Image: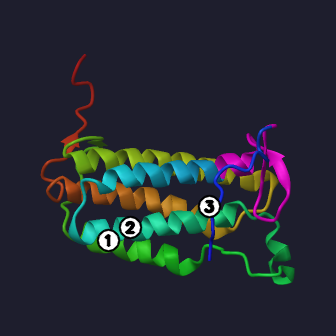
Amino acid sequence: MVVLSKIYTRTGDKGTTALGNGDRVAKYDARVTAYGTSDELNATLGMARLHAKGTLDTQLAAIQNDLFDLGADLCRPDIAADARADYPPLRMVATQVARLESEIDTMNDHLEPLRSFVLPGGSALAAHLHLCRTVARRAERLAVELAQDDEVNPHVITYLNRLSDWFFVAARIANSNGQDDVLWVPGANR
């Protein structure tokens, strides 16, 4: 269980922060940037949830929890040391990705195939979900970049990749099952 009795610690006042294994790194470190962006995505998702109801809100709540898991995974380097750790680090797992895929398939069953690209917009919820989609893509790019130089759990990258797809399909659901999608008209303003 997490207990936060004091919010400020002053340990980061000189521009460093502690990773999950206790190592101190610069606050602009690629790992910190990656999990910081997943936190930004979670906050953006919180804004979207202000407009969500029912099943979609329940699914969004599960994703918010997953994003905390994802941040915990990213802030703990050295996956090989997991077996020697005093307590098992929290890692993303394949079942979290599988759940997203199942939900995408279920939502997509209610949608007509697209004949054009969709512009971000329509309902307030759809617009927020499109913003979540773009932040998820940025988080994914940063995790992939981190993986070029450091170890990253592959389920983190797969989850973020699938999550941006989930947000896209959910935005279409939020737009009256795609009926209120705002479609791109190529060259419309030439």
| Distance of label 3 from label 1 (alpha carbons) | 20 Å
Disc 1 is placed on an element classified as helix
User: Is 84 in front, or is 97?
Assistant: 84
Residue placed under numbered mark 3 in the picture? 71
Residue placed under numbered mark 2 in the picture? 61
The residue located at (72%, 63%) in the rendering is 152
Q: What percent of the width, then of the height, locates residue 78?
A: 82, 67
Kindly indicate whether the residue at mark 1 contacts the one at mark 2 (C-beta within 8 angstroms).
yes
Residue placed under numbered mark 1 in the picture? 58
Specify start and end residues of the magenta stretch as a single range.
14-34
Is residue 128 toward the left or the right of residue 73 in the image?
Answer: left
The residue located at (29%, 66%) in the rendering is 57
Which numbered disc flags the more N-terminal residue, 3 or 2?
2
- Which of the 4 image quarters holds residue 49? bottom left
- Amino acid type, residue under disc 3 in the picture: Gly
| Distance of label 3 from label 2 (alpha carbons) | 16 Å
- Amino acid type, residue under disc 2 in the picture: Ala
Location of residue 108 with respect to 144 vertically, above or below = below
Q: What percent of the width, then of the height, locates residue 81?
A: 85, 75
User: Is 47 in front, or is 83?
Assistant: 47
Disc 2 is placed on an element classified as helix
Total tally of numbered discs in the picture: 3
Q: What percent of the width, then of the height, locates residue 89?
A: 72, 75
